[in-house]
Image (cartoon, grey):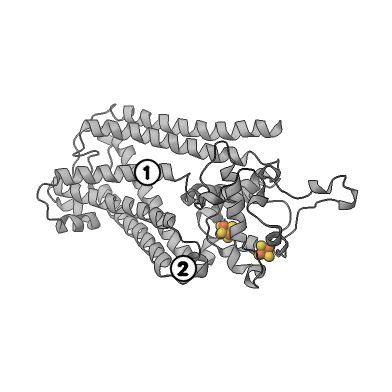
Amino acid sequence: MNNQKKERQVNDYVLLFSAGAALGTIFLWGASYIFPEGEIVEGRRVFENIPKYLQYLFYLLSASSIFISGYLFSLRAKNWARGTEEKRKVKISQRIVSLFDGLLMRTLLRFKAAGLMHSMIYIGFLGLFAGTITLEIHHLMPPSLKFLQGTTYLIYSFTLELASLVYLGGIAWALYRRIFGTEERLKTKTKMDDYLTLALLGFMGVSGLTTEAGRIIVEGFPDYEKWSFVGYFIAELLPIENGVTFHRISWILHVISFFIFLIVLPQSKLRHIVTSPVNMYLSPKERPKGAMKDIGNLMELDDIDSVGVELIENFTWKQLVDLDACTVCGRCTSVCPANLTGKPLDPREIILKVGQVMSDTGEPPVPATVTTPIDLKVKTSSVFERVTPEELWACTSCKACDEICPV
Ligand code: SF4
Ligand code: SF4
């Protein structure tokens, strides 16, 4: 009864949020017609060279993609709600500290190369995203309050160029680590999904810059656009006289790549952008670090089978959120004494296999974190469809995996 109530609440909340965000996008569309564009001096004209019908499509598809993305997230939340009750009585301040540890990548920065690479992608992405929001605010303002012109526009342009370079530099670094890196934990789990994900992220960044270059060509290379130094440089390199078609095609591809990103986000490992900070906010618990949960006096139990977990429904909802927050980084495996001494235990695999059982048996099923071969798909929610007792008995309960896990 309790679980049903929780399931309804979680799904409704996520779905309601996405519906609100989609309606908000439609509202922004309407609001953009309240004031005329007005005269912009040495600044940014929004939707320049983009015909009206493409602008309408942009808002409609943006709203649809946001809603679909939220709906797909709600299916994952439905899986978390299959778990049992778990209350963590901790102060909100502890949760906020933990959340900021995640957002500021403090846990990840313990590993210098990986931490810096992730920070570059994350900070660059956030910078570009903030730039897009700023542009939309500018778009909605009455002519007298439009601020992306003059010196403000130069600073805005220069900052976004830096963000683009940082973002693309991080992606190039990530690709390099995947292709040429020697770290065993990355090599053993790198799949086509990882390359496609990085290709999508990279395409979003590159198409943003080529769109900017196209716009600079259309505008006739104004001097103030030199502050958009990467876009300006690309514009000079392009052997194009009339940039109208190039700019439109580049804009369309850029926008489509963002829609794909929104829809792929809940379906792939990329979702850790959202689930990891959420998980870190939820993580603090009242038990001292390393202390295990009291399982009571086993001698007094009527049914010994009621101890521990077998079905997905036996885990707590928080443990199920943990499964969807995994980034597949493999740090847990790299420090596991059982794994290092040749025992049949790989903690990353345990998380992925249990996550797969949860995903495959969801209603409806959702994609597992890592693509699973069809012959390994499961039909019941028993974790022993994928995990063997030998793997579990090899664990020493040292919690080294828990300590090093960045999420
Ligand atoms: S608790 Fe220790 S032995 Fe068990 S999986 Fe984690 S690191 Fe390995
Ligand atoms: S459980 Fe944690 S440490 Fe292990 S692969 Fe997932 S994110 Fe990395």
- Residue 196 position in % (x across, y down): 38, 54
Say which quadrant the N terminus sits in. Answer: top right
Q: Secondary structure at mark 1?
A: helix
Q: Quadrant of ligand 2?
A: bottom right
Question: In the depicted view, which residue is nearer to us: 148 or 234?
Answer: 234
Tag 1 residue: 260
The residue carrying pointer 1 sits among few (fewer than 14), some (14 to 19) or many (20 or more) residues within 10 Å by Cα, namely some
Q: Please state if 64 lies on the left or on the right of 38 as rendered.
A: right
Say which quadrant the C terminus sits in. Answer: bottom right
Residue 78 falls in image quadrant:
top right
Question: In the depicted view, which residue is nearer to us: 191 or 43?
Answer: 191
Q: How many marks?
A: 2
- Residue 170 position in % (x across, y down): 39, 61
- Residue 229 position in % (x across, y down): 23, 57
- Image height check: is 235 above or below 82? below
Q: Residue at x 57, y 36 (%)?
A: 363
Tag 2 residue: 113
Q: Which kind of residue does numbered mark 1 sit on?
A: Ile
- Mark 1 or 2 closer to N-term? 2
Q: Secondary structure at mark 2?
A: helix
Residue lying at the far front of the rendered structure: 375
Q: Which mark is residue 207?
A: none
Residue 92 can be seen in this image: no
Q: CA distance from mark 1 to mark 2?
A: 29 Å
Q: Which kind of residue does numbered mark 2 sit on?
A: Ala
- Image height check: is 118 above or below 260? below
Q: Residue at x 40, y 70 (%)?
A: 180
